[in-house]
Image (cartoon, rainbow, N blue to C red):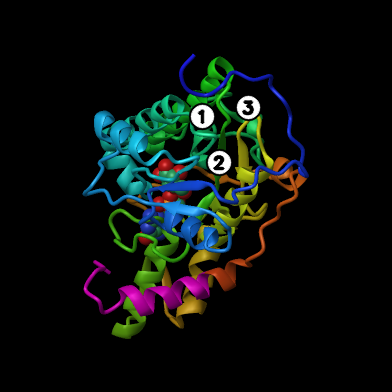
Amino acid sequence: MKGCARKKRVRIGVTDVFPLNGLRVWVAGHTGMVGSAICRRLDSEDCDVLTVPRRQVDLRRQADTEAWMAAERPDVVFLAAARVGGIQANDTRPAEFIYENLAIETNVIQAAKTIGVKKLLFLGSSCIYPRLAPQPMAEDALLAGPLEPTNQSYAIAKIAGIEMCRAYRRQFGCDFISAMPTNLYGAHDNFDLESSHVAPALMVKAHAAKQAGAPEMMVWGSGKPRRELMFVDDLADALVHLMKVYSDEPHVNVGTGQDVSIAELAQLICDVVGFSGRLEYDASKPDGAPRKLLDVHRLRSLGWTSKTPLHDGLAQTYDFYLRQVAGSGTTTG
Ligand code: GFB
C-alpha cells in the first residue's frame, strides 16, 4: 500500500510525545495570521520549518501541490492555508469560501498521504457547529443541527476537512488530526473593513474615530452576539502541543473557555485604542450566530490552557496595527 503505513489505532496520552526534533515541518499558509504565528512558535523547536509562497505553489492546483510536496518531502504538516474572512466576506462570497477551502484541503491531505507524511494537523473553525448548538459547544455537537447561514459554505468545507482526516486515518492509518479554533485575533490579521473579522475591524474603526476626533463609531449588528476570542500566539502554542501529544480521530476544540458580547468587545477595544466616543449600532448588518463558546475540556485534559487575557492580546494587536498597518497604506480603514 502506498502512503501512510496502516497501523493499529492507539490512543496516545499526554505524556506520549511526538517530538518535532530534526523533522521537516511544513507550515502551509505561512503568511496568514495563523500560519505566521505557528512559524513564530516553531522558532523555539529544533526542527526545519518549510514554507512556500503562493506565487510559487498555488495549493488550489492539485498537480502543483503534489509536485512541490513530493520534491520537498515534509515529515509534518500544519495545514493553516485557507480562504478566511469575517461575517460579510463569508455571507457575500460563499463560492470562493467553499471552492478554495475544499481544493486546498483535498490537495494537501491527499498528497500528504501519497508521500507518507508522518503527521498532519488540519485547522477547522468553530463555525462548523450548528447555529443553535448547546453552549459551550462540545466536539460531539458536530452535525447535530442546521448551520449558521452566513457561513454555511465555509463551514461545510471545514467539516469536509475533518472528515477527510478521519477517513484517511481509518482507511490508510495516516496520523492526521484536526483542531477547531475559536474566533482569533492578533498580529498579521486582516485589517480590511469589508472582509475582516470583528476585532481588527473595530480596532481600525476606533483608531480612525480617535484620529478624526469623531463623536461616535459604528458597530455592525445589535452588539448582542457573544464571541470567544483567542490570541493567535496562544492558538499556535496549542497547535504545537496537540501535534506533539494528540493522535486520535476526534477533532479537538481550541478556545479560551470565556466569551464576551460584541458590545463588551467594542468597549474593550475603544479602551485599548483610547477612543472615548459613543458606540452606534448598524442593524442593517448581520449578527450571525448568537453565541459560539467552545467546550475546551478535551484540550485541557490534554494538558493545555490558554494564557493571554483578552485585554493584553488586544493591546499587543493594536501595537502591531500601529507599527505595521496604520499609515503604511495597507488598510482601508
Ligand atoms: O468576526 P465576525 O466577522 O464573524 O463577526 P463571525 C462577529 C460579530 O461581530 C458579528 C459583529 O455579530 C458581527 O455583526 N461586528 C460588529 C462586526 N462590528 C463588526 C465589524 O465592523 N466587522 C465585523 N466583521 N463584524 C465568522 C464566520 O463569523 O467567524 C467565519 O463568518 C469564521 O466562517 C469566523 O467562523 C471565525 O464570528 O460571525
Amino acid type assigned to the residue bearing label 2 in the image: Met
SS at badge 1 = helix
Report which residue position mark 2 lands on: 180
Q: Residue at point 26% right, 33% down? A: 95
Q: Position of residue 237 (x, y in %)?
A: 60, 56
Asked whether residue 220 appears in the rendered view, the answer is no
Give whichever of 227, 44 is nearer the camera.
44
Give the CA separation, mark 3 to mark 1.
9 Å
Q: In the rendered image of this protein, does residue 60 appear above or below residue 263?
A: above
Q: Position of residue 131 (x, y in %)?
A: 52, 35
Q: Is mark 1 within 8 Å of ligand 1?
A: no
Q: Position of residue 158 (x, y in %)?
A: 45, 33
Give the CA separation, mark 1 to mark 2.
9 Å
Instruction: Report the magenta residues as a range.
Output: 314-333
Amino acid type assigned to the residue bearing label 3 in the image: Glu
Tell me which numbered mark, 3 or 1, is placed earlier along the sequence: 1
Report which residue position mark 3 lands on: 249
- The reply to whether callout 1 and callout 2 are in contact (CB within 8 Å) is yes
Report which residue position mark 1 lands on: 162
Tally of marks: 3
